[in-house]
Image (tube, grey):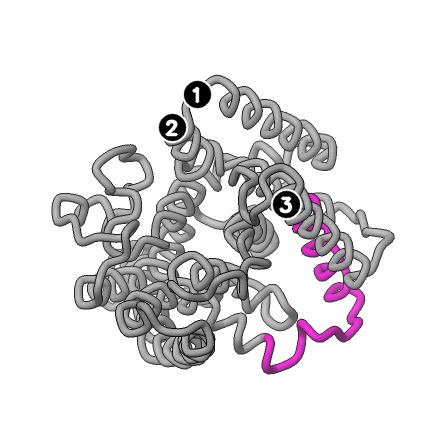
Amino acid sequence: MAVVLFHLALYLPGLGPALDVFRYGFTGVSFFFILSGFVLTWSHGEGDRTGKFYWNRFARVWPLHAVTTFLAVLVPPLASTTTIWPALPFVLTLTQSWIPGGGFVTAFNGVSWSLSCEAFFYLLFPLLIRGLRNHRRPGLAAGALFTAMVGVGVAVSVSVSGPVVGYLLGWLPLYRLGEFALGICLALLIQQGWRPRFTLAHAVGFTGVLYAALLAASLITSGKPGSVPVTYADLTMMPGFLAMIAAAAASDLTGNASSLSSNTIVRLGQWSFALYLVHELVIRMVRPLVAGSPTGVVLIASALVIAASVVLSGALHELVERPAERWLRAWGTTRRGRHRTGSRSGPPLAGDCQSGPSGGAFSATQP
């Protein structure tokens, strides 16, 4: 929702300062990358097969991505999102974030650039999890990794021009891999028995303070919101995101009920991937209709965009995402069973269709 509100503030004309507080909502992508590494580590068994892992990731992500890419052709483009047909093979193979020019990164459904990063993370995950599991001090590894990200971020920012910095530190999967690896380290740390001494409320408050600091820094340095560079904003928010995930996980493990475990929040969490992929398409449809309208009309349109995006995300989750994932996973399980038995009719193996832990806040956000 932070990303949704950020895009509303960015793309809908006539809002004025009404949604300026959400100018750093893009940092929600950083939260997603960290949480992705955490959840995949939490649900990964040491004996899990690499081929099965890759197939399950494809089944989880690609069908809905393909559908929303097709839908993107049917709606008006934004300035940063256009139909560039030569980019289509890269978009469909989730390699567009490796192409620095020509508008390929944000072609079709612009938000899918982050899935290109995720595809790279998935590719390296079997290697990363083996290496980091052998590390006796994942907390120390996380500290070294975050320090390295700060160092590289500052060094690149001061030595390279603006647009190139945006690509190298924002869209290029290689740098964003650090966020995913931080999530892996955090999950391993908690699996080894570490528990935070703060509550989820404390972590949320701490994250709010960091966000307020970003807004204050913007006003002090430039007099307008959103002026802190993307990389610095992401790095500022990462400690808060790590704290929230750690506190929520600890709450799940101790059985303490929280608002994140309510049926409504879990259901919205299940829809969140679809919401992420569909909301910008809704904004693109509404934007031409409200151009030049008074602020009040645009605010009403923004509320309708949010409502429509949530409803559409629920429909896409139930009608596309879930059935496609189940069918592909079952098909993959049957194929593996046939391969092992040397028969064309071998039965599925028990447990092959499982997709990680059930219950709690984190099953809903399985990326």
Cα distance between the residues tagged 1 and 3: 25 Å
Q: Does the magenta run of residues contain 136? A: no
Secondary element at image label 2? helix
Q: Amino acid at mark 1?
A: Val
Secondary element at image label 3? helix
Q: Amino acid at mark 2?
A: Val
Residue lying at the far top of the rendered structure = 159
Magenta highlight range: 238-265
Horizontally, residue 366 falls left or right of residue 261, namely left
Q: Are marks 2 and 3 in contact (CB under 8 Å)?
A: no
Image x and y of residue 45, in percent? 56, 51
**Residue at 54%, 47% in the rendered image:** 226
Secondary element at image label 1? loop
Q: Nearer the viewer, residue 22 or 341?
A: 22
**Residue at 77%, 64% in the rendered image:** 251
Mark 2 or mark 3, which has the lower sequence index? 2
Q: Does the magenta run of residues contain 251? A: yes
Residue 113 tag number: none
Q: Is residue 318 above or below residue 125?
A: below
Residue indicated by mark 1: 160
Q: Label 1: how many residues lie within 10 Å, few (<14), some (14-19) or many (20+)?
A: few
Q: Nearer the viewer, residue 309 or 141?
A: 309
Mark in the foreground, 2 or 3? 3
**Residue at 80%, 66% in the rendered image:** 254
Residue indicated by mark 2: 164
Q: Are marks 2 and 1 in contact (CB under 8 Å)?
A: yes
Image x and y of residue 347, in percent? 34, 69
Q: Would you say residue 44 is visible in this rendering?
A: no
Residue 219 tag number: 3
